Amino acid sequence: MYEHLETADPALVAAGKLKRVAVDPVSRVEGHGKVTLLLDEDNKVQQARLHIVEFRGFEKFIQGRPYWELPVMVQRLCGICPVSHHLAAAKAIDQLVGVDPANLPPAADKLRRLLHFGQVLQSHALHFFHLSSPDLLFGFESEIGKRNVMAVLADYPDIGLQGVKLRKYGQEVIRMVSGKRIHGTGAIPGGMNKALTKEERDYLKQDIAQIVSWAQAALQLVTKVHTSHLPYYDDFATIRSKYLSLTKPNGALELYHGGIRVKDEQGETLVDHYDYCNYPELIREEVRSWTYMKFPYLTSLGKADGWYRVGPLARVNNCDFIDTPLAEAARVEFKLHSGEAMVHSTLAFHWTRMIELLHCAESIQALLDDADLLSSYLVAKGEKRYEGIGVIEAPRGTLFHHYQIDENDIVTKANLIVSTTSNNTAMNESVRQVAAEYLSGRELTEPLLNNLEVAIRAYDPCLSCATHAVGKMPLQLELVDAEGKLVDKLIRHSSGEFIHGSE
């Protein structure tokens, strides 16, 4: 692997023999991040890092709030995947009112699933068509004017329009269930706040057959793109890793509720249908001084070997089958692509993302014929508890929400492990792989540096969601006057030591 490129030789740094190159900001991702390279005099890469430079302390400032506010409040983590946070929080507060997933009213369970399928559908469409398709259609080193969805709409109008309409439909599903396309309300403690009306259901049924057809076309497109650029697409940014995801008890792909499955690089199952309420025993997190994003790892394997990947590639690799026919046929074809038990190609995230897009479209189509969506039995009740854990498969991977409350129903502790956080080590490894294999020793140009961003975009990171503190995070505060002159500075190191700028 490429972990040796995480930190350059201190002697070279101290001697001033390395030059710094920065990609700042990383574009076409949600949130703010940058990549820095340290190069020697021969342009050989000595260090490569993905830095997450924003800090948003949701874990801290939701403390002191009543627990029933959480499903609405935590949506503000993100404007792209608010439903995922909404539902993960809802599953956690269900437990606080004594309702386990098995005891949720069938109508509430199916409405939440419909809402989540709409969320995953629109998010996958947004990422593939709006953010990543310019790289895939025009090339990784294409001219900068081509690297946007407007260029896709101009040169590939049918593809671009289908992407826009796929996302729109997913947003309409969200609107029908939760009242708004972004930051709506739906899930409440123990259930849902409303059913669908017959008119709302029929409205969604009008276009679902077309949506399934377009999802098939998107899958055919990404399959063609990937298989037309072999072995390059199999090798680019590719690393061998473990994979973590939820699955159903029968091993099927699951996006809303299931047990944790972990497989290793060879496809051997390390953990199967693990109760996610015991996740603190399975996963730990560490911090490093050069980024605000945490680094989760499997406790049993340690920091060096315990990192893993989550998201569409993990879910399709881990599951035994998909319970919708078109997506299952696509999964079988995908798995045959590799001579190994697991597909490790980082660019295969795009392929599996479109398999899931099709699965969501098929699942929505089936659910819209279910009469429970119109049922008025929506809320269950139980005995109060003081701790709740909700886990869901967000578009980008497994998402953990963990809350503790006091006797007054006030949140006293919160911990979030966001999907992108779990991919942190993997994204850094992919960045280092690209830096070492495709950039090192070459004269760096802007198109060439875009390769680093292509590697990151494959993971569809949501950087705003992923920046939460654990322990003592390093922090630097600067006071600047109206002319931009530095007046004062305060630095807190990860050790907790404070250094004043004048010291």
Image (cartoon, helix red, strand yellow):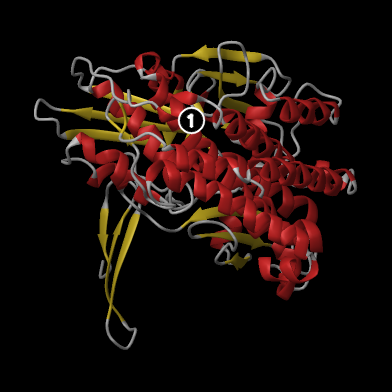
Residue at 39% x, 51% y is 180
Q: Is residue 108 above or below residue 224?
A: above
State left or right for residue 286 relative to residue 215. Answer: left
Q: Is residue 436 left or right of residue 429?
A: right
Q: Quadrant of the N terminus?
A: top right
**Which quadrant would residue 276 be assigned to in this image?**
top left
Give the tally of numbered discs. Answer: 1
Please say whether residue 310 is visible from this viewpoint. no
Tell me what residue is drawn at x 27 percent, y 39 percent: 70
User: Which quarter of the rendering shows the C terminus?
Assistant: bottom left
Rendering quarter of residue 313: top right
Q: Amino acid at mark 1?
A: Arg
Q: Which residue is mark 1?
A: 113
| Residue in the foreground of this view, choosing between 365 and 483 | 365
Query: In x, y percent, where is residue 32?
Result: 48, 60
Residue 302 x/y as whole percent: 51, 24
Q: 392 above or below 494?
A: above
The 10 Å Cα crowd at callout 1, few under 14, some 14 to 19, many 20 or more, is many
Secondary structure of the residue carrying numbered label 1: helix
**Which residue ends up furthest to the bottom in the rendered image?**
483
- Report the front residue among 152 and 184: 184
- Percent x, y for residue 347? 74, 44
Above or below residue 437? Residue 389 is: above
Q: Is residue 413 above or below residue 47?
A: above
Give the image location of residue 85, x and y in percent: 40, 40
